[in-house]
Image (cartoon, grey):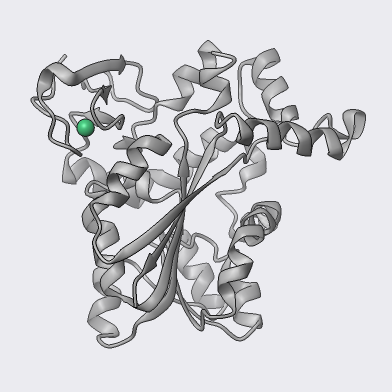
Amino acid sequence: MPLPKRCPLCYSDYYLQDVVTSHVFGNQPGRGNAFFRCKSCDVIYQYPGLSKQEEEKFYSAEFENFMDARSGKSGGWLNSENHVLANEKTRLRRMKYLEKYLDSSKEILEIGCSSGFMLYPLIEEGHNCIGIEPSGIFSQFLERNKVISFESLNDFRKNYKSIKFDLIMHFFVLEHIDQPLLFLQQQLSLLNPGGKIIFEIPNVADPLYCIYDIPEFERFYWSIAHPWYFSKHSLIYLLEQLVSIDYEIVLDQRYDLSNHLIWARDGKPGGMGKFTEHFGIEMENLYREQLKKIEKCDTLVGIIRKLE
Ligand SMILES: [Zn+2]
């Protein structure tokens, strides 16, 4: 197994880098990559990472199929309209913390907008929304539904040289990006003063991993699609590298108690809401709140404000 010479985020030395696992979900046999954790900044990263060629191949052709296999039928990655419907609960969960920033957000950019499910209600409310979406299936759907979208940020820049945004958002994108600091810096340059970047990423302190320690989940969790896994600690390290901003990290729990019971029973994903009718929505909410309170929950929300 090739070993990293230093941490790719904080550049700490090789002796501070520990192997987390060599089981990488979606790996080709014989690639020899693994996940390592840096004892200094706490980030977990894949080493060696995907080459540019492997990355392009992965994203252009394999991403939706890969995600469909991971999310089960309910995710609806292969059918854009189903994707919008299947993600309505996700949209409402996000709106709980997004709402308060929308009054001052006229110009909105979503990077990785997929089917556009976050954007349609915002467009209806009068926001100007632009999406970035590399997937061919989704971009055709976006065009049909009159969402201006581009394949990449570079592509967008070529077409819109002077536009600045009040809100840039991305959900489960940052952990896929080779150079996350550069990625956030580029977004800051596209923001109006006082503008926000709001994003979600997986929290490595996922209860299925760090409380229940379900072996099948462990095999599934460390994915070839992710160069990085952040904790609250390592996300703070990353955000501290940005200048002229302030930031806040909010904890959230996406998956419910039913999903966790299915993981424990069947060792596979799925089951969202399956048992809710038996133990009630209050129990689901209490369970989520408790996981957030003890900071063992599956999602980190970063809120960055560009200083005026
Ligand atoms: Zn480090």
| Image coords of residue 168 (percent x, y) | 42, 68
Q: Relative to 17, does residue 155 appear above or below in the rendering?
A: below
> Would residue 171 appear left or right of 268 to someone viewing this image?
left
Query: Closest to the observer: 237 or 119?
Result: 237
- Residue for point 57% across, 17% down: 211
State which quadrant residue 46 falls in: top left
| Image x and y of residue 225, in percent | 35, 38
Q: Residue at x 58, y 74 (%)?
A: 102
Q: Measuring 61% from the left and 16% from the top, which residue is drawn there? A: 267
Is 86 drawn above or below residue 129 in the view shown? above
On the rendered image, what quadrant is the N terminus found in?
Answer: top left
Vertical relation: 96 (above or below) 146: above
Residue 123 seen: yes
**Residue 28 at x, y percent in the picture:** 29, 24
Q: Nearer the viewer, residue 150 or 106?
A: 106
State the image quarter where residue 175 is shown.
top left
Q: Residue at x 61, y 69 (%)?
A: 100
User: In the rendered picture of this protein, how many numbered marks are placed on residues?
Assistant: 0
The image quadrant in which ligand 1 is located = top left
Instruction: Specify whether 119 is left or right of 28.
Output: right
Give the answer, above or below, for where 34 lies relative to 168: above
Q: Quadrant of the C terminus?
A: bottom left
Q: Quadrant of residue 160?
A: bottom left
Residue 2 in view of the camera: no
Q: Is residue 290 left or right of residue 157?
A: right
